[in-house]
Image (tube, helix red, strand yellow):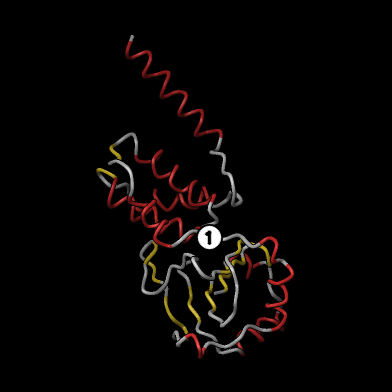
Amino acid sequence: MLDIDPAALEAGWPGDQRRQELKATGCPLVQTPRGGFHLYFRADWGNSVGVIAPGVDTKGPRGYVVAPPSLVNGKAYRWIRPLVPRDQLPPPPEWLDAALKAAAKAIEHAPDPKSAEEMAREGSILCEGQRNIGLTRLAGRLRRLGFSQDEIAAALLAANQSRCRPPLPEREVLAIAKSISKYPTGPVSLPPAFHRAWSRAIAHRRRFRK
């Protein structure tokens, strides 16, 4: 599956002619809540993050895909062209397949989809004062594994409902996903403001104990 983020489209990827070539394949097509697209092809691709272009990922075996009719921020993933059996999927355009093969050394294997679901729900209940920190840590773990903003948002929303007491407002959860997704995949360092807030909380607790 080819996952095209809205930012890649706004940057002009992959050019007018190649966009027409992608459209002409007639492949199953999903529009994401943020205006991106998922295109399904019959290809032996692995899972990659931004190796073709910034904001353009691929998902293959063991890749995590958010599919219709999933909701993010009240907006649904929707089929523009319906999914078909795998043997009826069209092949990708030659230029796209060649671009992926050229970047084969950069392909990163994403975790099993079940592991992301388990990560979202595992751990203790998060009470007031713990919810933001707990969800931010989860978002960081997912980002290190190469998940996109939409995928992180879906996982955080699930964790918010199952572990947070009471759940945070949806807009706050989505803000965490958006903030962490600005960092590149791989090791994620939390922003300085987070560390300053954490240090103040520890100092306050010590003063209270005294």
Residue 206 image point, x, y percent? 38, 15
Residue 96 to residue 105: above or below: below
Q: Name the kind of residue labelled 1 in the image.
A: Ala
Q: Which corner quadrant holds the N terminus?
A: bottom right
Which residue occupies the extreme left position in the image?
Answer: 166
Specify few, some or many for label 1: CA neighbours under 10 Å numbering under 14, 14-19, or 20 or more.
many
Residue 194 to residue 82: above or below: above
Q: How many marks?
A: 1
Residue 76 to residue 189: above or below: below
Horizontal side of residue 5 vs 82, given as left or right: right
Say what secondary structure mark 1 lies in: loop
Q: Which corner quadrant holds the C terminus?
A: top left
Residue 188 to residue 171: above or below: above
In percent of the image, x 48 and y 51: which residue is there? 142
Q: Looking at the picture, tell me which residue is in the foreground, 70 or 112.
A: 112
Horizontal side of residue 192 vs 71, given as left or right: right
In percent of the image, x 46 and y 29: which residue is there? 197
In percent of the image, x 36 and y 74: which residue is there? 69
Which residue occupies the extreme top position in the image?
Answer: 210
Q: Looking at the picture, tell me which residue is in the foreground, 9 or 181.
A: 181
**Pointer 1 residue:** 110
Residue 61 image point, x, y percent? 51, 70
The image quadrant of residue 79 is bottom left
In percent of the image, x 47 and y 24: which residue is there? 199
Q: Looking at the picture, tell me which residue is in the foreground, 187 or 31.
A: 187
Residue 5 image point, x, y percent? 57, 66
